[in-house]
Image: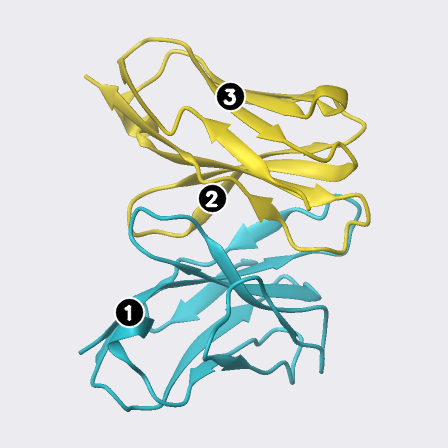
Chain colours: A cyan, B yellow
Amino acid sequence: EADIYQTPRYLVIGTGKKITLECSQTMGHDKMYWYQQDPGMELHLIHYSYGVNSTEKGDLSSESTVSRIRTEHFPLTLESARPSHTSQYLCASRGGQSTYEQFFGPGTRLTVL
Amino acid sequence: KQEVTQIPAALSVPEGENLVLNCSFTDSAIYNLQWFRQDPGKGLTSLLLIQSSQREQTSGRLNASLDKSSGRSTLYIAASQPGDSATYLCAVRTLSGNTPLVFGKGTRLSVIA
């Protein structure tokens, strides 16, 4: 079944650790996105990609980085986690067909102690 | 720059009521508009997608309308149920189709049994 997968779903980690949040989609979508969302707050776009080897920064300044080596995979990396990075991270993708409908993964809830 | 506003920010209704959620956008040159639902701590679920050439879309008890010239969309929920309780987000994609979605801050809906 075509879907978007995010792992881990929950992560509690200490300050200074390097972490990678995984996002994979099986829909063959070119466009992929990362959003950050604090509880009860609005979504903020932090990174996006138009395709392999393409990455762009979003509206919200982020200390994270992304890579797009394969169409289906769009990982987000924090080199040194800090408590201010505590948030929910949502991955999304959308097709290149005429509808351009966007779909979201289930999210990763990150807590940095 | 496109801005999306959703009113009201929160809404509480008794079960069985029909209700309308509002979304307005500042730039009418849009490619499409998408309504999402988000349950607490979860990702976003796509509810309805309206292309710029369409006036409305329906799915079950949900009906979304689009008046592009006035920069407005409404999401109508018929015969509301407690299971409809969630945050509803409206998002627009600009005319080029290649830019990221611009999201509103959402309407938090509570349906009381």
Structural distance between the alpha carbons of marks 3 and 2: 15 Å
Q: Which residue is mark 1?
A: A86
The picture places residue B17, in percent across and down from the top left corner, at: 34, 8
> From this viewpoint, which residue is outermost toward the top?
B17
Q: What is the chain identity of the residue bearing mark 1?
A: A
Residue A63 at x, y percent in the picture:
45, 79
Q: Nearer the viewer, residue A53 or A59?
A: A59
Q: Residues within 10 Å of mark 3 (few under 14, many from 20)?
A: few
Kind of residue at badge 2: Thr
Say which residue appears at 49% left-offset and 30% top-offset: B6
Please name which of the two marks, 3 or 2, marks the residue nearer to the observer: 2
Element under disc 2: strand
Query: Identity of the amino acid at label 1?
Result: Thr
**Which chain is mark 3 on?**
B
**Looking at the image, which residue is at 78% across and 51% down?**
A97
Q: On the image, which quarter does residue B91 sit in?
A: top right
> Is the residue under label 3 in contact with that under label 1 (CB below 8 Å)?
no
Q: Give the camera-side residue of A32 and B95.
A: B95
The residue that disc 3 covers is B60
Instruction: Report the side of B40 relative to A48 (left or right).
Output: left
Q: Residue furthest front?
A: B1
Query: Does residue B58 appear in this view?
Result: no
Q: In the image, is residue B13 above or below residue B24?
A: above
Q: Nearer the viewer, residue A43 or B13?
A: A43
Locate residue A58 relative to residue A53 in the image: left or right: left
Which residue bears the numbered disc 2? B45
For marks 3 and 2, the one nearer the N-term is 2
10 Å crowding of disc 1: few (<14), some (14-19), many (20+): some
- Label 1 residue SS: loop
